Image: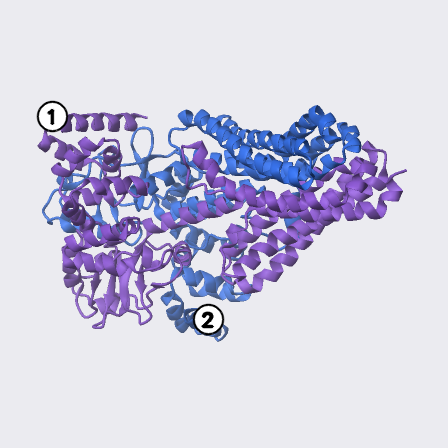
Chain colours: A purple, B blue
Amino acid sequence: MDETQELEERFAQLREDLARNRLQEFREQFLELHIYEQGQFYRSLDEAQRNLVYAYLSPKELADMFDVLEEDKDEIKEFLAEMRPSYAAEMLAEMYTDNAVDLLNTLPKPQVAQYLTLMETEAATEIKDLLHYEDDTAGSIMTTEYVSIVANQTVRSAMYVLKSEAAVAETIYYIYVIDQEERLVGVISLRDLIINDDDQMIQEIMSERVMSVHVGDDQEDVAQTFRDYDFLALPVTDYDDHLLGIVTVDDIIDVIDDEAASDYSGLAGVNVEEISENPIKSANRRLPWLITLLFLGMATATLISHYEQLVSKASILAVFISLITGTAGNAGTQSLAVAVRRLAMSDNKEAGIWKTIVGEVITGLFTGLITGVTIFLIVAIWKGNPILGFVIGMAMMCAITVANLAGSLIPMLMDKLGFDPAVASGPFITTLSDLTSVLIYFNIASIFMSYFLN
Amino acid sequence: MDETQELEERFAQLREDLARNRLQEFREQFLELHIYEQGQFYRSLDEAQRNLVYAYLSPKELADMFDVLEEDKDEIKEFLAEMRPSYAAEMLAEMYTDNAVDLLNTLPKPQVAQYLTLMETEAATEIKDLLHYEDDTAGSIMTTEYVSIVANQTVRSAMYVLKSEAAVAETIYYIYVIDQEERLVGVISLRDLIINDDDQMIQEIMSERVMSVHVGDDQEDVAQTFRDYDFLALPVTDYDDHLLGIVTVDDIIDVIDDEAASDYSGLAGVNVEEISENPIKSANRRLPWLITLLFLGMATATLISHYEQLVSKASILAVFISLITGTAGNAGTQSLAVAVRRLAMSDNKEAGIWKTIVGEVITGLFTGLITGVTIFLIVAIWKGNPILGFVIGMAMMCAITVANLAGSLIPMLMDKLGFDPAVASGPFITTLSDLTSVLIYFNIASIFMSYFLN
């Protein structure tokens, strides 16, 4: 709480400095803040105040702040629009390339072209190269600000290169060793540079088994490598082992967060990342799913409609519809979550598919058996009708088993067909399971009807 | 594929070396592997082979590998059990303290005490200190292997300290500056040390606004700070600003993964982290939830049972039960996911609670209206009965609105009461929503019954 208060006071002071045109005081105070806090302050300003900021700070100083200001793309577009184009272009050039590319990817093409024309050639070329990579690949999250050296030099001369590049590189904690054709041949950590003697040759101390990812690799696979190996950065190469860039751990945390949000969204049938303050907008985003599922649900209603005669004779059957569909839906959701998770985690997907599906069906049979026996006992005692209890229990067991089958089979199929299995949402599985459960329930009930209707 | 194959060949070679007692070759080949790959190899061995590994490798060498071997606690327990206790104790002492503590926390107390007695006093004391911290706090994930210096020295002498500690510190990329009472007064990155002149004084170049977390802080909040500030490590202090340890980004990735898995599990009503290969064990873990929800579902059945007379007169009502409960359940799940996500993300929870709930209700009214009108039209045309259509549409709208209320209110209440809101699972919300939907449906149907039964 104290820290927040202290920060608020600093912000108030900074606003005061802006209002009174105290350039020197503003710069001193502002640049003392951590870049994340600079961003918080900047976002709290109105347009007039921000225009002063653009006058008080250099494009480089603003770029440092923009490097961590990646939350709200719409907001950032607005910020760029209020800067002079040449100022904005210079700022983009000063940002880490991967972050600049992230920003540019949200802008209309003519605006991107304008900025690229205005900035110096080297930066423009680096950015253009990165703009080509497909979304969600290693290429789309890598940066080109890495430190590379050649192998036949001493630790001393490597440290010299490092010092000269330390101010602009995104990380200096791994130094990549390349050959004359810019192929990646080794890596050495700054820690190892520091521990070793100044006259030691790099080729003697570098690690030749350098772990790298391919530029077209899925960002999720890259994240998994970071998890496994606890790296802070990983080099990105092309098919011929040329070093193209590096991916750093801060970007990987964003990838992990995005993936988690997307899995969570899939399970709920709603995009939880686009949290709008406007309830009508939220409604509009949720309706497509709801209406689609409504039509799937209509299939269930049509099915029950076929059994209306049965229900009019045995209205007791209506009592248990929602219990059976609900419980099967719950079981199906559990299966779905486990299957999606297993697909995400498993390195060797092929082997596990059938094992998972068969396992889920066995789990379904077992949970179905226990749940079925429970509901048999309840109904037999409550309604004094063991045959009705048997019908409900039997239907429950079959419905749960089928729900588990659907919950595991569908995401596996989607994965096989190249779709994200997480899109097979919980609501979809429960709605589908309603249909199969009702079908099972009324078929079993038809067979035994003459027995439980005493 | 090539890399996997190459690794498999290396592993085969290593197993061959073990079989033929080629100590020197084994050590050379093994130590060339990345520690993660060492772990993969080690886990592929049988007990006899592992016993050779313990003879061939020093406790320190094995400790490096165990530092990244944190997947399966049961397996690791077994590994420890097969080592000589003094060897295991020395290995634990050589591990980073936070990882050793993680392992020890899974062992029975007498075994922990035995290891602590066998290891050298300094390591034992550090481990004992960390064993006290509560789960899920900054203290429980911090390590004590950091580099600290005092302010009144030059860059040259700081680099000297760094070199001597580089081999054992978990990170050397931030150096923490402390005063005589070991209070944290500043921080300097290795990058800044390298850029600056050797004769520069630390106090002139260190950052005095050092960001730190409190030892009792929730690990989720610590993860949020890492996300915001893109740090690689953060110092952990006590109430009096004494430096106790550091948290590193690799541990934060584990925290983020755990939180994501726990949110996902909550939504599905199943623990997706405990993925068992045994279907019966899976069933046993899922049954408690299913049976609990079965009893909640029984309330819905009992409620419908009260309306059995109504259903026997108007069996058409049974046709739409699952459509209404299903659609409301889907809407409720969407609300739940958004509410849980908003709770997890929001810094200023208090202000947002009512806003979220009111927003969700408005969203519910609007989606309910559209869905209700859709189903009204379908039923009016399909069954040629606009009044029945009105009943179904009206019930749908109210049921969806109530489901949205429940889906947002319940996680907010749980959070307020100090529970994890993610525990309010999707299956719980849908089962609860079944009850309210049926109640709404049959009440509306009772009122209009005389009109739609022509």
| Residue A68, placed above or below residue A421 | above
Given residues B104 and B123, the one toward you in this image is B104
Q: Determine whether the residue tagged by mark 2 lies in a helix, strand or loop.
A: helix
Crowd tier of the residue under label 1, counting other residues whose Cα lies within 10 Å: few below 14, some 14–19, many 20 or above: few
Given residues B362 and B223, the one toward you in this image is B362
| Residue A380, placed above or below residue B10 | above
Residue B175 numbered tag: none
| Identity of the residue furthest to the right in this view | A454
Crowd tier of the residue under label 2, counting other residues whose Cα lies within 10 Å: few below 14, some 14–19, many 20 or above: few
Q: Quadrant of the C terminus of chain A?
A: top right
| Residue B54, placed above or below residue B25 | above
Q: Residue at x 49, y 32 (%)?
A: B363
Q: Amino acid at mark 2?
A: Glu
Q: Residue at x 83, y 33 (%)?
A: A383
Q: Is residue A270 visible?
A: yes
Q: Position of residue A12 (x, y in %)?
A: 21, 25
Report which residue position mark 2 lands on.
Answer: B8
Q: Chain of mark 2?
A: B
Would you say A313 lies left or right of B78 here? right
Q: CA distance from mark 2 to mark 1?
A: 69 Å
Q: Are marks 2 and 1 in contact (CB under 8 Å)?
A: no
Report which residue position mark 1 lands on.
Answer: A20
Q: Amino acid at mark 1?
A: Arg
Do callouts 2 and 1 point to residues on the same chain?
Answer: no
Would you say A283 lies left or right of B121 here? right
Q: Chain of mark 1?
A: A
